[in-house]
Image (cartoon, grey):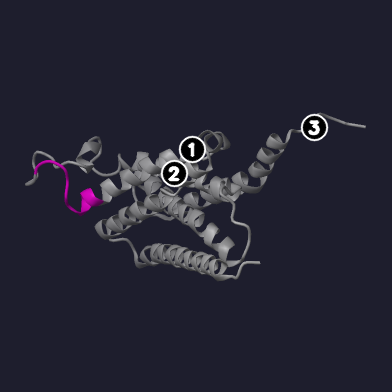
């Protein structure tokens, strides 16, 4: 005898995603951000908040690029859309957008346009082409692409666009990561962060690059082996 209403497969899947992915990711995001916020010596809230959301966002983004190669290397099924990869990307997008929004208020308080153009008292004119401008342009381009990916990280967009178009759009995640890495390196140099943070980001970048290369190599080898197998 039925005790209560039966959940539809879609709602059951959503419930599992919330319990298995979103709640742990919320705890990881909030916990790591809180730890960085409380341990940084910056005197104001905005600088602490900007810093404390940057590193968790980068590591979650790196994780989305590592899950696929891990499946390939472990000979597991590597679906077009993985719930874990998608949900991790959602939290990376949330933190990345929050970091960018807060970051516009950290330097040059009240004048965020000077992140991208030279001020009247500076020697140059027009768009910034110094390291500060490079770090800001790569950061804002990264978050704009991240916002587009976040907006389409759902089943509706997958059905609407179709698998090939949706997958091609999601591959811009590589560009997001590359631009975010350039942004992070730029600010590491500008702010002269401690060696520990330099090493931490370097490990994240290196691990992602190595895993992507290893996964790509395995896929190429498997396609080559299938192509040379005799018929029948």
Q: Quadrant of the C terminus?
A: bottom right
Closer to viewer: mark 1 or mark 3: 1
Q: Is residue 216 depicted above or below 78 in this figure?
A: below
Residue under label 3, please give it: 6
**CB under 8 Å between callouts 1 and 2?**
yes
Q: Position of residue 126 (x, y in %)?
A: 12, 41
Residue under label 1, please give it: 152
Query: Is the residue marked by circle 2 packed among few (<14), some (14-19), or many (20+) residues within 10 Å?
Result: some
Q: Is residue 124 left or right of residue 164?
A: left
Q: Is residue 92 left or right of residue 199?
A: right
Which residue in the rendered view is the most extreme toward the front? 231
Q: Secondary structure at mark 2?
A: helix
Q: Is residue 70 depicted above or below 54 in this figure?
A: below
Rendered residue at 39%/54% (across/down): 40
Query: Is the residue marked by circle 3 packed among few (<14), some (14-19), or many (20+) residues within 10 Å?
Result: few
The residue segment tinted magenta is: 125-134
Q: Identify the mark nearer the N-term, 1 or 2.
A: 1
Q: Secondary structure at mark 1?
A: loop
Q: CA distance from mark 1 to mark 3?
A: 29 Å
Q: Identify the mark nearer the N-term, 1 or 3.
A: 3
Kindly indicate the quadrant of the structure image that contains residue 104.
top left
Q: Is residue 1 visible?
A: yes
4 in the magenta segment: no
């Amino acid at each position: 005898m039925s005790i209560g209403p039966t959940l539809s497969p879609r709602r059951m899947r959503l419930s599992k995603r919330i319990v298995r992915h979103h709640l742990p990711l919320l705890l990881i995001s909030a916990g790591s951000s809180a730890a960085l916020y409380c341990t940084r010596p910056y005197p104001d809230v905005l600088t602490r908040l900007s810093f404390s959301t940057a590193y968790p966002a980068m590591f979650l983004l790196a994780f989305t690029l590592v899950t696929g190669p891990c499946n390939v290397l472990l000979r597991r099924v590597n679906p077009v859309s993985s719930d874990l990869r998608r949900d991790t990307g959602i939290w990376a997008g949330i933190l990345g957008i929050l970091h960018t929004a807060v970051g516009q208020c950290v330097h040059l308080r009240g004048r965020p346009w000077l992140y991208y153009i030279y001020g009247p008292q500076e020697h140059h004119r027009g768009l910034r082409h110094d390291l500060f401008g490079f770090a800001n342009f790569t950061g804002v381009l990264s978050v704009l692409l991240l916002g587009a990916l976040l907006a389409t990280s759902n089943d509706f967009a997958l059905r609407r666009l179709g698998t090939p178009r949706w997958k091609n759009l999601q591959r811009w995640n590589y560009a997001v990561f590359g631009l975010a890495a350039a942004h992070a390196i730029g600010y590491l140099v500008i702010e002269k962060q401690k060696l520990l943070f330099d090493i931490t980001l370097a490990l994240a970048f290196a691990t992602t690059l190595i895993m992507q290369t290893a996964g790509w190599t395995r896929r190429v080898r498997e396609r080559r082996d299938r192509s040379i197998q005799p018929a029948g």
